[in-house]
Every structure is written in structure tokens, then in C-alpha cells.
Amino acid sequence: MDPATKTIIRTGRKFEQVLLGARKVFMADGFEGASVDDIAKAAGVSKATLYSYFPDKRLLFMEVVRSECLRQAEDAVELADFDASPQVALRFAGYAMVDIFTSDFSQRIFRVCVAESDRFPELGWEFYQSGPMVGRARLTEYLKQAVARGELKIDDFALAADQFVELCKADLFARMVFGINRDFTKAEKARVVEAAVDMFIARYGVAP
Amino acid sequence: MDPATKTIIRTGRKFEQVLLGARKVFMADGFEGASVDDIAKAAGVSKATLYSYFPDKRLLFMEVVRSECLRQAEDAVELADFDASPQVALRFAGYAMVDIFTSDFSQRIFRVCVAESDRFPELGWEFYQSGPMVGRARLTEYLKQAVARGELKIDDFALAADQFVELCKADLFARMVFGINRDFTKAEKARVVEAAVDMFIARYGVAP
DNA sequence: ATGAAACTGAACTGGCCAGTTTATAATCGT
DNA sequence: ACGATTATAAACTGGCCAGTTCAGTTTCAT
């Protein structure tokens, strides 16, 4: 009613509990599929308590995605080993990225974001900023150093980074989002990552 | 009730009409968001008629996706000019692919498939088979001919095709699915496609 | 023109769910 | 230990929607 009331109350004993339960249920069932009763139950909290923290289901959902994106961003920081040669660093980053986006959690959050970013425009943006963009920035930073060291030759850094990320998704990503496979063998991952590195070096490597 | 009844009746004057209305509403609102009343209204048909063709909403939805995938597959047949040089053929295919997956319709169907392929395992599979796989097969075919002509050197054809497809999505795809951009300028597309071709040739081209 | 098949519209059932309310109980600072 | 804050359980409101039913109308083949 009162627009000033439409804010999340972050203080209170069970705030975290609510968020945790919401996370669990939203990730499992999506926004529409999740019922507030289920969330309250999963959180071990009464519905009234839940509504005392979050004015409505939408804001609760947004908050879950926001907090999860922050977590994901922290994981992504490990991506690059800045001093290594391109072959080594890219291989490492490639395997790390594949592991991240094939993880059960990433699959779920991606699915939910894609599904709901029509109804929640700010949601897609938030995920994009704190997910893919973080990895890209990190990779770009590495590429710049490698170019400075004369190990690579690149004009459009952002594009190069995006290309490498994209190459690491070849085959795997499509099979994943369409539910053909839920997870992959080491060999399947290796096939893609090694080929991604080879291709990247072939294009941007400097002749020795 | 009777399991034999759980089949789609394809004969009847208004079958196509129903499918058309369903297509429109499902694409706009997704599976959960679309109400059968809306679909019947959009189709210019009574709800009873709709249910005389389709035993339930799920099967109607599946049928819409199936038929739309077939349409998409036919568009994709135009992708390759088999006799052209890699530079020319890949450029052409790249622009065509970008146009396809940035189209309003592809965006919608992708969104819906990703969202619902948890609840409808066979849906993701169907889309995968009649969408991405068709393009990949077509491209693989071209690559084999180019290799036979000595214009390229490739071991893993399927992977090479997937890599090229993936390269054409760099930057654009993420911005699209997360709703950052709904469409792109010629320059944005050119930046990605030209870079994709350059990279592919750098890796698989034969020295002249 | 006539009878069968297809279609209509509207009402109805049963179920689910977001959000509210209320009376009661647990928890906490002081 | 007491008053205020916070939490609870359960019932309730109002709304939406999938799927059914039915009495009556249109369409079409013969």
C-alpha cells in the first residue's frame, strides 16, 4: 500500500533463514513454480514472518538472485593465473569456466534468469553484470598483460575474451541448457577446452 | 482418462487456427503465463473446440514447439553455399546464423525452451535436434567438402562446426538472452562474424 | 434438404496460490 | 522479570486457471 513499505527489512533473527529457504525453492522450481508456502516451509519459518521481511514474492526472488550472483562473482575471481603463459593460463581458465557453467547451481540460475528476464528486466541485467561480465573483465585483464609481454597480439580485447569464453561452451553448453546432458566427463570437457586454447593461440598467438 | 484418447487429432477445420493462436500466445507469455482461455480467444475458437483437438495444454505446447522447430530448420537449409571458398561461405553462414538467433521469434522460443525443459524433458531434446543440430550438420557437410578440396584442415568436424557457431554468438548472445539488447546494428554483427571467420581460418586454414 | 460431425458460448468444478489477519507464544534487551 | 519486539499457526479472502459439460448452432457431404 504505502510505497515506503515496499522495502526489504534486513534486520531480524530469521532474515538469513528466509533467504536460504527461498534460494532452495526458487532454484528448484523457478519463480512461477515456487509457492510462498513451500518457501516458508523450507525456511522453517511462518508465512507471516516471511512477509514481514519481504513485501512480496517478486522482491524476495530478486534478492535471492542478487545474493547468488555476488557469490558466483567471488568464485570467478580465481579464474586467471596472471603470470603464466597463454597456453597454461587459458587452459586453466577454460577448465575453471567449464566447471562453473556446468555446475548444477549455474544451470539452475541460468534457467531461471532466462525464463524470467522478460518479466524482470532488471534481473537479466543483474545476472549479466555479476556473472559473465566479471569473467570477461578478469580475462581481458590477463590478455592485456600477455600482450604487454609480447606473448599475444590482440586488437579488440573484449571481443577476444568473449570469443574464448564462447569457445569453451562449444557443444557442451547447448547440450546442457536443453537438458540432453546434465554433466560431462573429463574427456568431453578436455576435448572442448583444449580445442578452444588451440584455436585462440592460432589466431592471437605470436610466432615464436 | 483413456490413454488412447491422449492423442492429438489433426483432422478438422480449425486445427491450424488453434495452432496459430497457441503459437502467438505461448511465444508471448511462455507456458505458465499463457492461459487456455487466451489461446482460444487468440485462435478465434471456443475452448471446447481447442480441447477437442488437444487433450491438454502440455501437448498443445509441445506441438507448437515441434512445428516451429521444423520451420526454423527449413530456414537454416539456406545456410551454406557449398562451392564457395571458406572465407566467403563462412561469412555468409555466419551472418545468416546471427540473423536467425537474434530474431524475435528465436529469442522467444529459446527462452521458453530453456525455461520449460525441466518440466518437459522431451521439449529441449526436440528443439536441440531440429534447431542447433540441423545447422551443425549443414556446416559439417560444407567443412568436409572444403577439406576435400584442400582449403581447410580439420580433424574433429563436429567440434569445428560447433566452434564456429559458438564464435558467432560471442558477446551478442549473452546480451540477448539477458535482455540487455533486443536487436543489434549491422556493425555489431559484423564485428563478431568477421572475427569469427578470421579466427576459424587462422586455426583450420591451410597456408596458401 | 437432411443428418452427422464440428463448433460455440457460457457456466461450472475443483484446485492452487499470493497475501492478510488474528490471537497466541517465544525471545530479547534492560 | 517485564515490556517490547518478533515469530507462529491456521484460517480466510479473492482471484486465476485447467479442464468439463451441455444445450444449441453452424457446416458440409450426400
Image (cartoon, coloured by chain):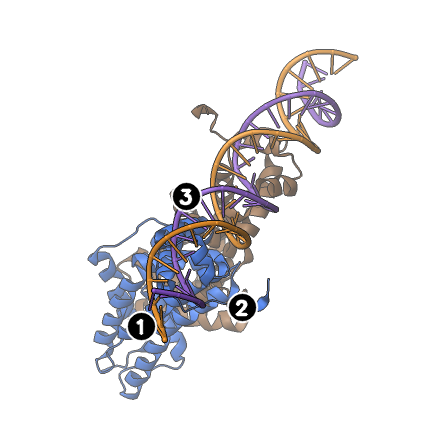
Chain colours: A blue, B brown, C orange, D purple
Tell me what residue is drawn at x 50 percent, y 52 percent. B109
Callout 1: helix, strand or loop? helix
Q: Locate residue B183, reporting x and y percent.
A: 55, 65
**Cα separation between marks 1 and 3:** 33 Å
Chain letter, disc 2 residue: B
Q: Residues within 10 Å of mark 3 (few under 14, many from 20)?
A: some
**Cα separation between marks 2 and 1:** 31 Å
Q: Name the residue under label 3.
A: B120
Q: Tell which of A92 and A26 is nearer to you.
A: A26
Residue A74 tag number: 1
Q: How crowded is mark 2: few (under 14 residues within 10 Å), some or many (20 or more)?
A: some
Q: Mark 2 points at which residue?
A: B184
Residue A66 tag number: none
Tell me what residue is drawn at x 48 percent, y 25 percent. B5
Q: Which of marks 1 and 3 is in front?
A: 1
Q: Are marks 1 and 3 on the same chain?
A: no
Q: Which of the 4 image quadrants contains residue B21? A: top right
Q: Nearer the viewer, mark 3 or mark 2?
A: 3
Q: Locate residue B7, reporting x and y percent.
A: 48, 29
Tell me what residue is drawn at x 53 percent, y 65 percent. A6
Q: Locate residue A63, reporting x and y percent.
A: 43, 65
